[in-house]
Image: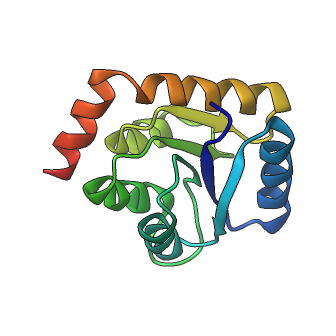
Amino acid sequence: MKEKNILIVEDEMIVAMMIKLKLLDMGYKFAGHATSGEDAIRMVKEEKPDLVIIDIYLKGKVDGIEAATEILKSHIVPIIFLTGDPSRETRVKASIANPVGYLQKPFMDEELEYVIESAFHKAKSPVFKQMAQDMAA
């Protein structure tokens, strides 16, 4: 299970490096780091990660929700949203991309590990695969 590649999409370098170190400590592989929605879309095509952890609010023209939606049009990959915004409005807006999990900044190591394991479990379900195929259509 831990042989999975995870892509981090986060424009705050300190947060991205902290997540990377935690992923490596947990035994996961690091598929790369993108700082913008545009880079995330390109990197998913190139690296084909098993999971994407993406900040909802990214600098640039494409935010995390738009990037996730675009990624899911061509790749069936579970998405975990990362955000510092606890509002219901943000979660409702993000739900359009059918994320398999959310991480609220700041988070504990245990929360990161739980959300990742839960995401991989959900990604195995026929419901996830069907939703991903529907988004791609």
Where in the figure is residue 77, as x and y percent of width and height?
41, 46
Instruction: State the residue at coordinates (50%, 22%).
Output: 121
Where in the figure is residue 38, as x and y percent of width and height?
46, 75
Where in the figure is residue 28, as x and y percent of width and height?
72, 43
Instruction: State the residue at coordinates (42%, 30%).
Output: 123
In the rendered view, how is the structure colored? rainbow
| Number of numbered discs | 0
71 lies left or right of 102: left
Question: Quadrant where the N terminus lies?
Answer: top right
Where in the figure is residue 119, as x and y percent of width and height?
53, 30
101 lies left or right of 116: left
26 lies left or right of 89: right
Question: Compared to 85, does 17 lie above or below?
Answer: below
Residue 6 visible somewhere in the drawing: yes
Question: Compared to 112, does 137 lie above or below?
Answer: below
Residue 108 visible somewhere in the drawing: no
- Between residues 53 and 82, which one lies in front from this camera angle? 53
- Between residues 106 and 115, which one lies in front from this camera angle? 115
Instruction: State the residue at coordinates (79%, 35%).
Output: 107
Instruction: State the residue at coordinates (27%, 40%).
Output: 132
Question: Compared to 115, does 66 lie above or below?
Answer: below
Residue 12 lies in quadrant: bottom right
